[in-house]
């Protein structure tokens, strides 16, 4: 099926716009992660957390400090929130003084 010239131009413009929207969507997610806030992270490769230990394959916290990634272990409250997020069994609530 042969399209006329106007249809070909419109199809090319639509294709370029679709690619631009896709790249904008991808970069938007990256900027949300690099917002300086702590996020749940399960590294597949070993990373060194703030206490100097290496962690791989278990959930930790990570954040972008503007020039590098920082990693730390979860607090007890974060462990409970992570367990709730993944739908694990109920964990005991930490006691408050």
Image (tube, helix red, strand yellow):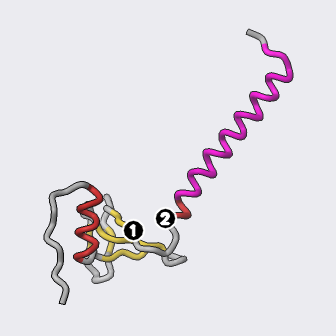
On residue 12, the disc is none
Residue visible at 28% across and 72% down in the picture: 78
Q: Is residue 24 above or below residue 73?
A: above
Q: Is residue 28 left or right of residue 93?
A: right
Residue lying farthest right?
Answer: 5
Q: Is residue 20 magenta?
A: yes
Residue 24, percent from left and from top: 63, 52
Residue lying farthest bottom?
Answer: 97
Q: Secondary structure at mark 1?
A: strand
Q: Which residues are magenta?
A: 3-29
Circle 1 sits on which residue?
39
Q: Secondary structure at mark 2?
A: helix
Residue 34, percent from left and from top: 51, 68
- Quarter of the image that includes the C terminus: bottom left
On residue 33, the disc is 2
Magenta region, mostly helix, strand or loop? helix
- 94 or 44, which is in the foreground? 94
Residue lying farthest top?
Answer: 1
Q: Is residue 86 left or right of residue 3?
A: left
Residue 95, percent from left and from top: 16, 82
- Quarter of the image that includes the N terminus: top right
> How far, Cα to Cα, is label 1 from label 2?
8 Å
Sort mark 1 into few (<14), some (14-19) or many (20+) by Cα contacts within 10 Å. Answer: some
Residue visible at 33% across and 70% down in the picture: 47
Mark before the other along the chain sequence, 1 or 2: 2
Q: Is residue 18 above or below residue 73?
A: above
Q: Is residue 69 left or right of residue 7?
A: left
User: Picture quarter containing residue 41?
Assistant: bottom left
Q: Is residue 28 above or below residue 65?
A: above
The answer to whether mark 1 and mark 2 are in CB contact below 8 A is yes
């Amino acid at each position: 099926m042969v399209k006329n010239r106007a249809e070909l131009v419109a199809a090319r413009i639509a294709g370029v716009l679709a690619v631009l929207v896709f790249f904008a969507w991808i970069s938007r997610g990256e900027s949300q992660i690099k917002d300086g806030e702590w996020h749940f992270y399960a590294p597949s490769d070993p990373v060194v957390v703030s206490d100097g230990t290496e962690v791989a394959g278990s959930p930790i916290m990570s954040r972008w400090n503007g020039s590098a990634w920082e990693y730390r272990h979860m607090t007890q409250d974060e462990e409970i929130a992570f367990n709730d997020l993944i739908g694990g069994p109920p964990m005991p609530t930490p006691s408050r003084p």
